[in-house]
Amino acid sequence: MTTETITMDIHEILTRLPHRYPILLVDRVVELVKGERIRAIKNVSINEPFFLGHFPHRPVMPGVLILEAMAQAATLLALRSMDMVLDDKSVVYFAGIDGARFKRPVEPGDQLVLEVTLGRAKAGIYKFSARALVGDQLAAEAELMCTMRRLEA
């Protein structure tokens, strides 16, 4: 059995995720296997707006944004696995975050590698195992649960 490996540039990511600057936190997908896993990149720049206040004397990417980056990669995995593109009446929400751990600070100049594996998809709830790495060092990890919902007019 041949497993197709998919990549995505920023242009395709913009067609699949509703997020835009400054909250779009995935720059490239280097590997995606439908229904299994994704490996994506977030290039962390000193120009990120959150660095102005977190922290001016020692800029560090907020942990909640690392979780958000992992969730965006998870969303790309789920959507691409279903060959689905969100319309403006659909949204993906966090349903839960378990076991979040932060192991190393993420600083300007780092390249955050987001590795997400799909655990299960049942009754509209998707469960993922996610890790964020800088080089070969673990920066953060968590179990993420997400759900897709239709917006009411």
Image: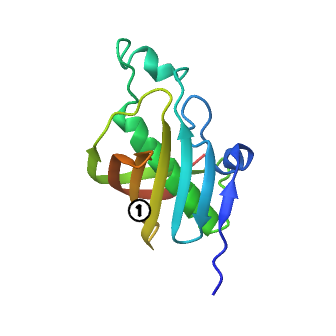
| Image location of residue 69, percent across then percent down | 48, 43
- Location of residue 129 with respect to 151 vertically, above or below: below
Residue 151 visible to the viewer: no
Q: Residue furthest bottom?
A: 1
- Residue occupying the point 69% across, 53% down: 8
Residue 39 as seen in the image, left or right of residue 7: left
Residue 55 percent coordinates (x, y): 35, 17
- Residue most extreme to the front: 136
Task: Give the structural element (helix, strand or loop) at label 1.
Answer: strand
Point 63% across, 47% down: residue: 28
| Residue denoted by label 1 | 128
From the viewer's perspective, is 112 left or right of 150? left
Query: Depth check: 124 or 139 in front?
Result: 139
> The disc labelled 1 sits on which kind of residue?
Phe
As drawn, 31 above or below 26: below
Which image quadrant: the N terminus? bottom right
Quadrant in which residue 120 is drawn? bottom left
Estimate the x, y position of residue 106 in percent, counting from the top left.
Answer: 40, 33
Say which residue appears at 55% left-offset and 20% top-offset: 47
Instruction: Give the residue displayed 72% in from the left and 50% down from the top.
Output: 12
Q: Nearer the viewer, residue 7 or 25?
A: 7
Q: Quadrant of residue 56?
A: top left
Asked whether residue 48 is in view, the answer is yes
Say which of 97 and 114 sits in front: 114
Give percent across and percent down for residue 129: 38, 61
